[in-house]
Image (tube, grey):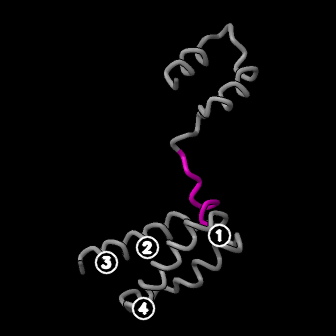
Amino acid sequence: MNGLRRRIDNNPSIKIEMLNPIWELFGIYRDLKYIDYNTALRERQDLKSVVMENLQDLKERGILHWLDIDAIWFDHQKKRASHGVALLILNALEISLKADEA
């Protein structure tokens, strides 16, 4: 379906705007492979809870005592800064540390 959409989108005789509702009906989106991590960490409760739990565990380890994880999280949630990727990297660090312990 995505290949079909590309072929149709690349056809200069077809107005792409007219087909967008049809593509959405079938669940075919151009940006399907993209997640806006900044927004997702502010709005998706499932993602927020997992990341927050891992960040608290990472903080309790004391290995990043020089990094204020709570301030990074708070500034991101209040939209003072966009730290989505940094928060996910810290989350991945904690998951890796937990995996090494198992």
Q: CA distance from mark 2 to mark 4?
A: 13 Å
Q: Nearer the viewer, mark 4 or mark 3?
A: 3
- In the displayed structure image, the side of residue 87 where residue 40 appears, left or right: right
Q: Nearer the viewer, mark 2 or mark 4?
A: 4
The mark that comes first in sequence, 2 or 4, is: 4
In the rendered structure, are the residues bearing label 4 and label 3 in contact, judged by CB atoms less than 8 Å apart?
no
Q: Is residue 39 magenta?
A: yes
Q: Main secondary structure of the magenta part?
A: helix
Q: What residue type is disc 3 on? A: Lys
Q: Position of residue 12 (x, y in %)?
A: 65, 10
Q: Which residue is mark 3?
A: 98
Q: Which residue is mark 1?
A: 81
Q: What residue type is disc 2 on? A: Leu
Q: CA distance from mark 3 to mark 2?
A: 13 Å
- Quarter of the figure with residue 24: top right
List the single residue furthest toward the right: 18
Q: Which residue is mark 2?
A: 90
Q: CA distance from mark 1 to mark 2?
A: 16 Å
Q: Position of residue 49 (x, y in %)?
A: 55, 74
The mark that comes first in sequence, 3 or 1, is: 1
Q: What residue type is disc 1 on? A: Ala
Q: Residue at x 59, y 77 (%)?
A: 73
Q: CA distance from mark 1 to mark 4?
A: 24 Å
Q: Position of residue 45 (x, y in %)?
A: 62, 68
Q: Which residues are magenta?
A: 34-41
Q: Which residue is mark 4?
A: 60
- Quarter of the figure with residue 82: bottom right
The mark that comes first in sequence, 1 or 2, is: 1
The mark that comes first in sequence, 1 or 4, is: 4
Pointer 4 local density, CA inside 10 Å: few below 14, some 14–19, many at least 20:
few
